């Protein structure tokens, strides 16, 4: 029945029935009776606390914390619209909800992973740039570090101690190995920030700036460990992101970075050492620097076709683990392929192999930087990838590479003059060995089984089409 038909049969206004469907009105017994008569069902059918099997997934969704905990308005969704969708096609929506739940179970998706996936979607929706957070950082800098005074570890420590009454206490990961993977733990009841004693100066400054962010922005719902063990709510994940964004913004000033990037992009040739020098001048880790780039490039340079990823590798081994990725567009990237071997021509991987070799020879002890123009063999898409590799856990010989990847288009060519540099390394790449049709590739480490299966299916379909 349409809303107008139900309204006529029940003697109620169309607007009133619409409000019921949207969850804004709750009819009393006489109204429910009129609705039941109009729809030719028993009164008990409309007030039963048990739903049919088909509608159980919707019941689970409504009883869960999802609708109350996830700020749907962040994604431009009005909760009443969602309820209206549930009301208009409950069986179809129920099937969709069940499908998503089954997919999540099949891939063993945790609540934390779901929250992080939603956060990445939120970042991508806004090109990872939030002007209100930049304004908060500007206010902080104007108050505590004017005239381009650097935000030092000393300043941050003094602020935490004197303004926020927080005690800073280092811990030895050798004495507490269970905490070795954590950079910090904050105990709100004692107002003590416990810092990992093995942090590098740049890491320590960032952790302190992040804690200042929680206090300065008055973010009460928050994780208390970094990197945190679990997430209890999306608000906690979102507030953690806000404090992290704030920390990056006060440590790497917007105006300074924009000026340096403009000068770098104007160069006619690419210089690995100059890029490393810029990172060092910002007193940031390569990962933190790239992340700050992702805040600036879409907004101020119009470069929004980009993605970021991080690989870990034990020196001397041919196993590479993708440990982090962020896409700000539908660009081609690793996309978390399971049980496949990433293309060994990617600069993110070759730079780790190079670093391992240099460490073995004793020719380097710090970070190395390389840039590469990569053209995908399958579709011809071209990307500029800038990658920095450095020791991650020297005691275990684990290295890390972080890479920022840019789709080569007219905007990028206009902004980055060094793209025309003939000495810039250029290679043909692909996604994974299992999908790759470059059969004479010397770097291949696995047979193209996925590609072969795809071609077999295409041949079978062609043969079916020839049948008469």
Image (cartoon, rainbow, N blue to C red):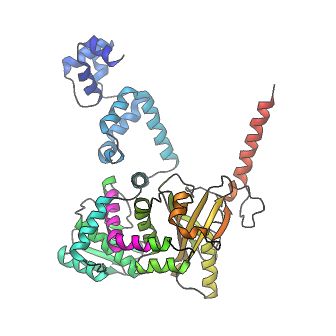
Picture coordinates of residue 185, whole percent (x, y)? 32, 71
Is residue 245 located in the magenta-colored stretch of the structure?
yes
Q: Which quarter of the rendering shows the N terminus?
A: top left
Query: Can you name the residue that lies furthest to the bottom here?
Result: 362
> Residue drawn 47% across and 51% down?
109
> Residue drawn 34% across and 74% down?
251
Is residue 136 located in the magenta-colored stretch of the structure?
no
Residue 398 falls left or right of residue 279: right
Picture coordinates of residue 101, whole percent (x, y)? 46, 42
Q: Which quarter of the rendering shows the C terminus?
A: top right
Front residue of 277/76: it is 277
Residue 285 falls left or right of residue 401: left
The image quarter in which residue 215 lies: bottom left
Q: Which is the main secondary structure of the residues drawn in magenta?
A: helix
Residue 362 falls left or right of residue 50: right
Q: Is residue 99 above or below residue 441?
A: above
Residue 166 in view, yes or no? no
Which residues lie in the magenta part?
Answer: 237-261
> Residue drawn 72% across and 52% down?
449
Picture coordinates of residue 75, whole percent (x, y)? 36, 46
């Amino acid at each position: 029945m349409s809303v107008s038909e139900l309204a006529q049969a029940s003697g109620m206004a169309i607007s009133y029935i619409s409000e019921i469907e949207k969850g804004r009105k709750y009819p009393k017994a006489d109204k429910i009776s009129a609705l039941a008569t109009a729809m030719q069902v028993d009164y008990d059918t409309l007030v039963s606390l048990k739903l049919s099997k088909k509608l159980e997934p919707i019941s689970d969704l409504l009883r869960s914390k999802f609708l109350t905990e996830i700020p749907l308005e962040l994604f431009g969704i009005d909760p009443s619209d969602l309820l209206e969708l549930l009301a208009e096609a409950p069986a179809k929506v129920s099937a969709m909800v069940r499908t998503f739940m089954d997919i999540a179970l099949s891939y063993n998706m945790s609540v934390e992973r779901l929250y992080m996936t939603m956060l990445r979607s939120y970042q991508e929706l806004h090109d990872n740039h939030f002007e209100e957070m930049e304004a908060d950082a500007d206010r902080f800098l104007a108050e505590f570090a004017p005239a381009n005074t650097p935000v030092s570890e000393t300043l941050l420590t003094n602020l935490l101690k004197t303004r926020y009454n927080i005690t800073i206490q280092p811990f030895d990961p050798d004495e507490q190995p269970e905490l070795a993977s954590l950079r910090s733990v904050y105990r709100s009841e004692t107002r003590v920030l416990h810092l990992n004693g093995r942090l590098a100066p740049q890491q320590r400054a960032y952790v302190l700036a992040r804690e200042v962010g929680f206090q300065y922005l008055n973010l009460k719902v928050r994780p208390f460990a970094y990197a945190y063990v679990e997430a209890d709510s999306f608000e906690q994940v979102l507030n953690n992101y806000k404090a992290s964004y704030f920390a990056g913004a006060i440590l790497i000033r917007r105006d300074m970075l924009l000026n340096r990037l403009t000068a770098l992009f104007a160069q006619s040739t690419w210089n690995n050492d100059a890029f490393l020098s810029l990172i060092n001048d910002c007193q940031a880790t390569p990962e933190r620097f790239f992340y700050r780039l992702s805040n600036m490039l879409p907004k101020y340079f119009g470069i929004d076709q980009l993605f970021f990823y991080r690989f870990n590798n034990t020196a001397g081994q041919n196993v590479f683990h993708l440990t982090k990725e962020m896409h700000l567009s539908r660009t081609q990237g690793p996309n978390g392929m399971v049980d496949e071997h990433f293309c060994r021509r990617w600069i993110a991987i070759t730079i780790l192999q190079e670093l391992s070799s240099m460490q073995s020879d004793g020719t380097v002890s710090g970070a190395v930087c390389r840039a590469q123009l990569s053209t995908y063999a399958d579709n011809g898409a071209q990307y500029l990838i800038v990658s920095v590799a450095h020791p991650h856990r020297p005691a275990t010989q684990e290295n890390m590479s972080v890479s920022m990847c840019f789709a080569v288009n007219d905007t990028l060519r206009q902004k980055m003059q060094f793209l025309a540099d003939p000495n810039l390394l250029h290679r043909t790449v692909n996604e994974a060995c299992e999908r790759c049709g470059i059969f004479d590739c010397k770097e291949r480490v696995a047979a193209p089984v996925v590609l072969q299966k795809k071609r077999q299916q295409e041949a079978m379909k062609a043969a079916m089409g020839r049948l008469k």
